[in-house]
Image (tube, coloured by chain):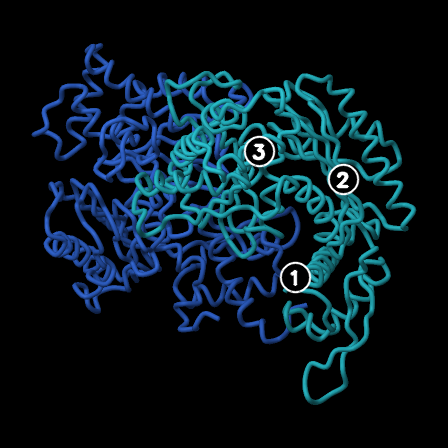
Chain colours: A cyan, B blue
Amino acid sequence: MQSPANQRAVRRHNLGIVLGHVVRHGPRSRATIAQETGLNKSTVSSLVTELIELGLLAERGTERTGSVGRPGLVVEVAAGGAAGVGLEVNVDYLSVRVVDLAGGVRHRALQAADLRGRPPEETLDRLAAMARSALERLEAEGVRAAGITVALPGLVDAASGTLLLAPNLHWEDVPVATALAERLGDAGPPPTADNEANLAAVAEAREGAGRGLSSFVHVSGEVGIGAGVVIDGAVFRGAHGFGGEFGHMTVDPDGPPCACGSRGCLETRAGLEALLAAAGEPEVDRVPSGEPVTRLASRADAGDAAAVEALRDAGHWLGIALGSAANLLDPQAFVLGGFLAPLAAHLAPAAEEEMRGRVLGAGRRMPDLITSPLGPEAAVRGAAALALARLVDDPGMLAGDARD
Amino acid sequence: MQSPANQRAVRRHNLGIVLGHVVRHGPRSRATIAQETGLNKSTVSSLVTELIELGLLAERGTERTGSVGRPGLVVEVAAGGAAGVGLEVNVDYLSVRVVDLAGGVRHRALQAADLRGRPPEETLDRLAAMARSALERLEAEGVRAAGITVALPGLVDAASGTLLLAPNLHWEDVPVATALAERLGDAGPPPTADNEANLAAVAEAREGAGRGLSSFVHVSGEVGIGAGVVIDGAVFRGAHGFGGEFGHMTVDPDGPPCACGSRGCLETRAGLEALLAAAGEPEVDRVPSGEPVTRLASRADAGDAAAVEALRDAGHWLGIALGSAANLLDPQAFVLGGFLAPLAAHLAPAAEEEMRGRVLGAGRRMPDLITSPLGPEAAVRGAAALALARLVDDPGMLAGDARD
């Protein structure tokens, strides 16, 4: 019932449906794809042919789908057809992760460094060098770079790829995507940028604790505490893309001043600095942040009173914020990521106790409190996945078609 | 490219597209509908014929769309084709509102009454009597009742139409939809039930301050404070449909005890009872709630110090909760409805000041604070709209088709 003018757009849309189906569900025959997507068999055959020509799918052996008829040829994702380059600038490290169409990790690297207050130019030079070496390796392997996405710890204008404000990094109005594009020249596709917590939630939804959940909030502790709000399986970014500033929810209105200018933000009570200070961890050791977190977890495991008490107190404040978010949004679950994950065993009981007292109808709908299985790499994983997702959604971009 | 088995489902889907288009955009020719929806002209003609046969569209004169060719016959919504029946049970009133396909109000009624602690059976008897009289009037007018939706002040399981918990009404586990269906018998379609704040947000999005906004939070004060979270134009209800319990966000962790069992919920600081008590309004006058609210607004307008101070203080606490919600969700706007609307002139300045200090990057993204133009009828308006929306989305239900 589509008018002819829409036919080409429909075909392009269907290319994405077929590629995405094989990426998500694995190798299968054209007949199976047709059955599962509701598209015509002849349409699927023609789409698969185009995806093979684009180097994104490949033939692989046969599959017998029933007791009669001839077995169908199975197509699978061409692992080397394309890869997504994820980058991350955080307060105490730079990171790169390259993932191919089959989900294989082609390259990864991490540089620990205290980047607080460093000039953006210097940090972006280092990030560009890491990106360049990843792109060179991809080129040597004959794999096309489908996209580059940078995860950033602050408010990001995703449309322009500009970091507007990162209190913990002391950056303001840094055009990260443009600056990186200038440094990379023709070496790669145009970079995009996004908030780290949003990207961590993307990774959690695709390959972590959020798989199969329709709504959850991924609360991720780096130095600050961010969140990605996932609704109907997609990250909700808000009107300006600034949603998920979980660490700046007020939990103690007359509490300590926060770096953001407010008072009593969750970060002042359960952020990494507040937590380490409360537990008596020396400040000098805070970079890279993973070391004192591991030490704090060990102390608490061993029953060290100051560590246990500091974590219980942080869990209490975290539970107040989680309770408010649960009352407002009623998500299926909260996923605790970043530094909150290795400390979850000591934080979660106090947080849950607080939530049980504060969530209206808690007996009927306490959200699950889940520990992220992805570790500190969630954001850069999400960045790589998103860099690749644009191609999976729209493989026709490789055919040189302009989007309608 | 649809397989033949899907053709019928597609046609039924397209019936909804055509009816919805005319409902939302007004009378137009078949050619204009085809152009604007992207459907084929011949398809549109056939769909319009079916909608006319169902009594939902009607022919009306002609429209000249260009300088050449013959003028097209214009079709419009058949106002009397169907109507939605909205009902509301609140803490201090019962309400009914009947709206037809053209948006005309066919019937409305309100009964003030203090329903706190009254037996649900008694209240549902009264509600059923109001519904029956509305349905009788519709029948006399020859208008089909497309649906009945009840707005309720608490946690509602929308799937079963059960009110699970309403702290201010003192109701628990009341199967409202079923109980109303029993009372109405064959007099009307099966009732559904939903949370009042969600329904008020539906009305706000369709015909109030939320028109044209893609994301906003409608914060509505009745006796409690509820909210409807609108994302991409639709109300997000959460995993169990319990989202939007804005009044139970914690603003003062060690604050006064709340009826819900928690402490320092927004309702304890800016709910109607707390506000009236702080302003020195006598308790005996609190039903119906509109009267003391009007008097409080008049006192504040006249510069009465206790009234101004009570409203400023409530605005301060409201701003803390709005600031946390803005940090988490980054909505385009907050719409203040219910008793917050007539008091907004005195509440909003303190709330905005608080938000400016607490929203990260407030200079770049302060959500607008908008006063609802719908008044206390927002929830019952939303209920009527939703009762009708099911028919508009799926007019094929009248043709006796089963949904796939």
**Which residue is found at the position 81% from the left and 34% from the top?**
A130
Expressed as whole percent of the image width and height from the top left, the position of residue B178 reads: 23, 63
| B162 in relation to A355, above or below | below
Residue located beneath label 1 in the image: A2
Q: Nearer the viewer, residue A270 or B303?
A: A270
Question: Which chain does the numbered disc 3 sit on?
Answer: A
Residue located beneath label 2 in the image: A148
The numbered disc on residue A295 is: 3
Q: Kindly tell me whether residue A145 is visible in this rendering.
A: yes
Identify the element where label 3 is drawn. helix
Callout 3 environment at 10 Å: few (<14), some (14 to 19), or many (20+)? few
Identify the element where label 1 is drawn. loop
- Mark 2 or mark 1, which is nearer the start of the sequence? 1
Seen as rendered, the residue at the extreme right is A140
Expressed as whole percent of the image width and height from the top left, the position of residue A27 reads: 73, 68
Left or right: A132 as drawn, with respect to A72: right
Identify the element where label 2 is drawn. strand
**Which residue is found at the position 16% from the left and 57% from the top?**
B128
| A175 in relation to A139, above or below | above
**Which residue is found at the position 59% from the left and 32% from the top?**
A222
Camera-near label (1 vs 3) is 3
| B258 in relation to B362, above or below | below
Q: Report whether mark 1 lies on the same chain as mark 3.
A: yes
State if disc 3 and disc 2 touch (CB < 8 Å). Answer: no
Kind of residue at disc 1: Gln
Mark 1–mark 2 distance (CA, rounded to whole Å):
35 Å
Mark 2–mark 3 distance (CA, rounded to whole Å):
34 Å
**Which residue is found at the position 66% from the left and 31% from the top?**
A152
